[in-house]
Image (cartoon, grey):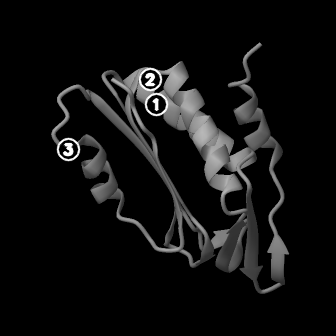
Amino acid sequence: MTVAATIRIQDADFDVAREIADLSKGRIDIGAVVSFSGICRGSEQGEPIAALTLEHYPGMAEAEIQRHADEALSRWPLQGLTVIHRVGRIEPGENIVLVVTASAHRQAAFEAAEFLMDYLKTSAPFWKREESARGPSWIEARGHDDAAAARWTKS
């Protein structure tokens, strides 16, 4: 059975439970569903955050996420895969990203979800600007995120 990944980049919020239900409804071949939802924090290192604004390169972002989704589908025996990433202004407490992976067994679902989140955190073509009392500032990549992503590199 060929598995098609669902990939959406959108301004609108999403319902995590509905997305999981949509992926697994009526499926008896799925034994594990793993989800990761990223939510906008209200502070960073003790400093209040008013909002994040996420920008992307339309078309390129979807293609790059699809490329990594295809890699996940080739590396792990998945029965389902959903990636949703929001763009635009996002306030604290609102959803930013959702990755849902489904497999017959939990290990594949966990590993594929981690692989995709590490990619989204380090290499996906999104730019994040933080609004705080100091004013707006672009968020740079973090070394620990790069280290986490490096574990998936094929030798």
Q: Secondary structure at mark 2?
A: helix
- Crowdedness of circle 2 by 10 Å Cα count: few (<14), some, many (20+)? many
Q: Which residue is mark 3?
A: 25
96 in relation to 107, above or below: below
Pinpoint residue 105: horizontal percent, then vertical percent: 33, 21
* In front of the other: 2 or 116: 2
Q: Is residue 135 left or right of residue 66?
A: right
Q: CA distance from mark 1 to mark 3?
A: 20 Å
Residue name at image x 30 percent, y 45 percent = 23
Q: CA distance from mark 2 to mark 3?
A: 19 Å
Pinpoint residue 2: horizontal percent, then vertical percent: 38, 27
Q: Is residue 105 left or right of residue 88?
A: left
Residue name at image x 49 percent, y 72 percent = 94
Q: Where, by quadrant of the figure, is residue 48 drawn? A: bottom right
Q: Quadrant of the C terminus?
A: top right
- Can residue 98 be seen? no
Q: Is residue 2 left or right of residue 52?
A: left
- Can residue 14 be seen? yes
| Residue type pointed to by label 1 | Phe
| Residue type pointed to by label 2 | Ala
Pinpoint residue 63: horizontal percent, then vertical percent: 64, 47
Q: Where, by quadrant of the figure, is residue 1 drawn? A: top left
Q: Where, by quadrant of the figure, is residue 78 drawn? A: top left
Q: Which residue is mark 1?
A: 110
